[in-house]
Amino acid sequence: EFPSYYSPYYIRISILNKKDKDNNYEEAHIYLPNETYLLPNHFTLPFKIYL
């Protein structure tokens, strides 16, 4: 069960599929509700893994 503020429809995060020399991802993007497309070369993760 998720806290009441959780909604997969409003919170979306994508990560650029590129790592730096320390093996960390270089960029992430938090989407606004009106953004319906992913940025190029990004992938999404389920928000529940961050809770």
Image (cartoon, rainbow, N blue to C red):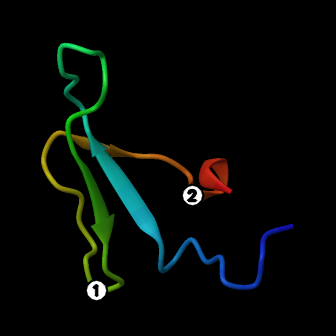
Task: Give the percent coordinates (x, y) of residue 7.
Answer: 61, 77
The kind of residue tagged 2 is Phe
Quadrant assignment, res 35: bottom left
Circle 2 Cα neighbour tier, 10 Å, few/some/many (<14 / 14–19 / ≥20): few
Look at the picture and state if 19 lies above or below 31: above
Q: Amino acid at mark 1?
A: Asn
The residue under the point 42% across, 65% down is: 12
Q: What is the number of the mark on residue 34?
A: 1
Which residue is outermost to the front?
A: 22
The image quadrant where one finds the N terminus is bottom right
Residue 30 versus residue 20 in the image, above or below = below
Q: Earlier in the sequence, mark 1 or mark 2?
A: 1
Q: Residue furthest left?
A: 40
Q: Which residue is mark 2?
A: 47
Question: In what quadrant of the picture does the C terminus appear?
Answer: bottom right
Looking at the image, residue 40 sits to the left or right of residue 17; the answer is left
Location of residue 25 (image quadrant):
top left
Marks 1, 2: nearer the viewer: 2
Query: In percent of the image, x 75 and y 84: which residue is there?
Result: 4
> Residue 15 at what x, y percent from top left?
30, 44
**Who's the residue at 31% across and 71% down the image?**
31
